Amino acid sequence: MDTAKINPENRGSEPEPFFSIRFGDVWRGVVKFWWVCLVLGILFAGILFYHSYIRFTPVYQCEASFTVNTREYMDLTGGVSSTAYYYNRVTADMLSTTFPNILQSDILQELICRELGTAAMPGTITASALSGTNLFTLTAKAADAQVAYDLLMAVIENYPRVAEYVIGDTELNMLSPPQVPAEPINQYAYRAQVAKGFMAGLLVGCAWILLYATQRSTIRSRKDIRQLLRQNCVGTLPYVVFKKHRKEINRTVFFENQFIGNGFLESLRGLRSSVLHGLQENEKIIMITSTAPGEGKTTVTVNLAASIAAMHKNVLLIDADLRNPSVKARLEDSVEGGFIPVTEAEVYIPKHAVLEKLPGRSLSLITFEGDKKLWSTLNHNWLQKWLNQFRNQFDYIIIDTPPCGIITDPAILADVADVILYVVDQDAVRISRIKNAIESISGKKARFMGCILNGAASGIGGYGENYGYSRYFHKYGRYGGHYGYGKYSSDQNA
């Protein structure tokens, strides 16, 4: 018997790209994490609204317009002197330069604080002058309307006392008396803050989706199996689609189900042909495994075994997945009549195993009961002899094993099988995990025949595995299900 192992060249595969992005990954990220973008948008909008709300301070503004004249002394006839306030262009230019500086002087601010009874200026004072005139406008701003008014009046009251030391005696002629402001000059723009926060949250969500898309280093096509895993792709099974029906129909993924599309049937026939033609002389024992639970390994195994048996080949199907024995349940759901126990077998059946047969079919099934660690406790030579006794009675022996990326049972069975078929669910498990799992069963007796790409899809976000499903198909069904491997059952990069 040919005992070829996994090609050593396959182990030196190309490194996974650290940063790559595809439209299909982005679309899957949007479908999977759109709610994250929405939640982040709402959260950021709320945070920014609250933050700006508690920091918002109303600003009240009080204004007064007036003219400023300076006083000059004049000698009158008879030695009598007099004073008069007057305005000229030179004085106006000087006032426009010095007036703002006087307002910011420490002396004036100290007088204002003393009059208002505060330790510091309760607001701000600015002055603006009309060029070429002695017309000025004083503006006081504060967080309180009354404070703004009092501040402005204090400036008007104390300004002449300070200005006297700079530009001489001055007179303020009020043109428009100030009024206590009724409302602040600024408004809280809550809509703008909410919009900014929401957009910021969306951007963070989009960044998360892009990061998710760049890290999805998975198998998406036959080409990926050849180039990234350096393995042969034995066949491809499509993502199953059922037609819309008003009444409940059989949605079991089994090749005899009349509601299964032609794409699946054609692909299964192609897979069966590739497997049978790929077997070498005396190779009869085929083990089928995968990396992780939920990749459809058992459904692929059941369909392959039943379709070979439909060719009038005598097939023995062994459910070696002791932690999640589901082969019998899949067949009972798909085939009417159920199993018939075989009590007088021509081969040795240990007490912990049960041999059954489907009536009217050349398909037999062996299931196990009891110890879930059976394979690690059995003697290797005994297990080899036990399987070899079926070679003369059956044309093909197909073993459904646990995922080899979780437990070591497949590695034990790979030492007694002839060939290995490896199920890879499209876009489900990281390439690094698949490589490590394949490496765990390398160097064994069984020859690694290749991989089966399962659940291939087309359309938006698909990767080119098109099986011609029309728009009338609307309900999708992945193979596989929930496995009983505890914490490992969710360890999947879906």
Image (spheres, rainbow, N blue to C red):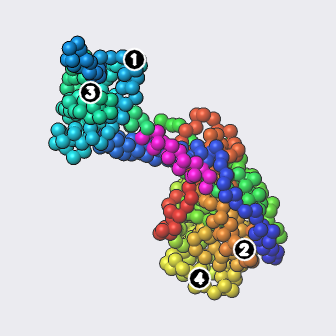
Q: Quadrant of residue 231?
A: bottom right
Tell me the mark number nearer the camera, choosing from 2 and 1: 1
Vertical order, 402 against 125 (above or below): below
Q: Which residue is mark 3?
A: 169
Nearer to the camera, 210 or 45? 45
The numbered disc on residue 442 is 2
Query: Label for residue 119?
Result: none
Between discs 3 and 1, the one toward the N terminus: 1
Image quarter where the C terminus lies is: bottom right
Amino acid type at circle 4 is Ser
* Amino acid type of the residue that numbered disc 1 sits on in the rendered structure: Arg
In the image, which disc is placed on residue 376? 4
Q: Nearer the viewer, residue 409 or 77?
A: 77
Between marks 2 and 1, how big is the CA–CA gap? 101 Å
Determine the residue positioned at 61% across, 55% down: 215
Q: Residue 37, position in %: x, y?
A: 47, 44
The magenta stretch spans residue 174 = no
Residue 86 seen by the camera: yes
